[in-house]
Image (tube, rainbow, N blue to C red):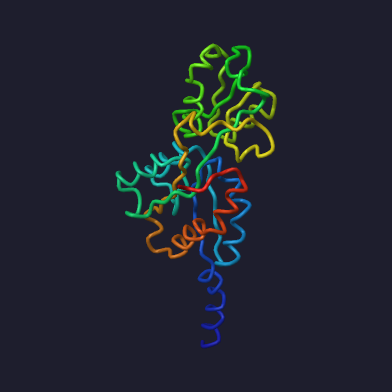
Amino acid sequence: MRYLWLFCLCLALPCWSNETLRVAVAANFRPVLEQINPEFEAAQDTTVLLSSASTGVLHNQIRYGAPFDILLAADSDTPAILEQEGFTLPGQRYCYALGRLVLLGASDWSALADPRQSLAIANPTTAPYGRAAEEVLSRDEFQAGHKRKLVLGNNAVQTWQFWHSGGVNLALVPQSLSLDAGLLVPQQWHNAIEQQAVLLPRAADKPQAQAYLKWLLSPAVRQQIRQYGYDNCL
């Protein structure tokens, strides 16, 4: 019996040693995590499972019980609302990146005033980058283009795909999705895209969730995030 007990214990050890974190991440930031997460997973013996969509969609999934430990939103409003609604651990909300927009498909800004140029943006109803794009388009100098064909992506990544496939002439997307192309939108043309992270109630008994956020906010990882087209939080 003693040997049988030891054998069962050995079988169980891998399950005890490896933690699994479920991270809901805004679509724009998933490619970054796919690149940098292996460092954390190896150091902490933790598997990080990613689920991505627009921030608005993730908000609804969390409210209806999706089993996430952490939310990495593309704005600050959604984490604040979830906190007010009681869907987060109190006092566990942090800025992890500041997003930037780029205009793809144009050599100068006059393209946004040309109604002949079709344009893709993320759906402003659910995607913070779409709301920022709307603010850019509302500027006086671009009003002449308001009758253009406007295509809405479900999220920032789909918006980029519309442009990349040739479905539209122009696209306003996160800089992180196109580091080597596009016109960088001046920050003063839209409200700051402050991307916040928040711990969810399922993470209350998971020390690795807090460790993950500490790692994500560390100076070394912040520097890596900058290389993917984001600014550091103020």
What residue do we see at 49% from left, 59% from top?
A: 212
Q: Identify the image quadrant of residue 10.
A: bottom right
Residue 107, compared with residue 174, is above or below; it is: above
Residue 124, compared with residue 48, is above or below; it is: above
**Residue 103 at x, y percent in the picture:** 61, 28
What residue do we see at 48% from left, 31% from top?
A: 188
**Residue 151 at x, y percent in the picture:** 57, 22
What residue do we see at 65% from left, 23% from top?
A: 108
In the shown orientation, is residue 126 left or right of residue 40?
left
The one nearer the camera, 230 or 121, is 230
Residue 225, compared with residue 183, is above or below; it is: below
What residue do we see at 68% from left, 30% from top?
A: 164
Residue farthest bottom in this picture: 2
Number of numbered discs: 0
In the shown orientation, is residue 123 left or right of residue 183?
left
**Residue 109 at x, y percent in the picture:** 61, 22
**Residue 74 at x, y percent in the picture:** 48, 41
Q: Identify the image quadrant of residue 6.
A: bottom right
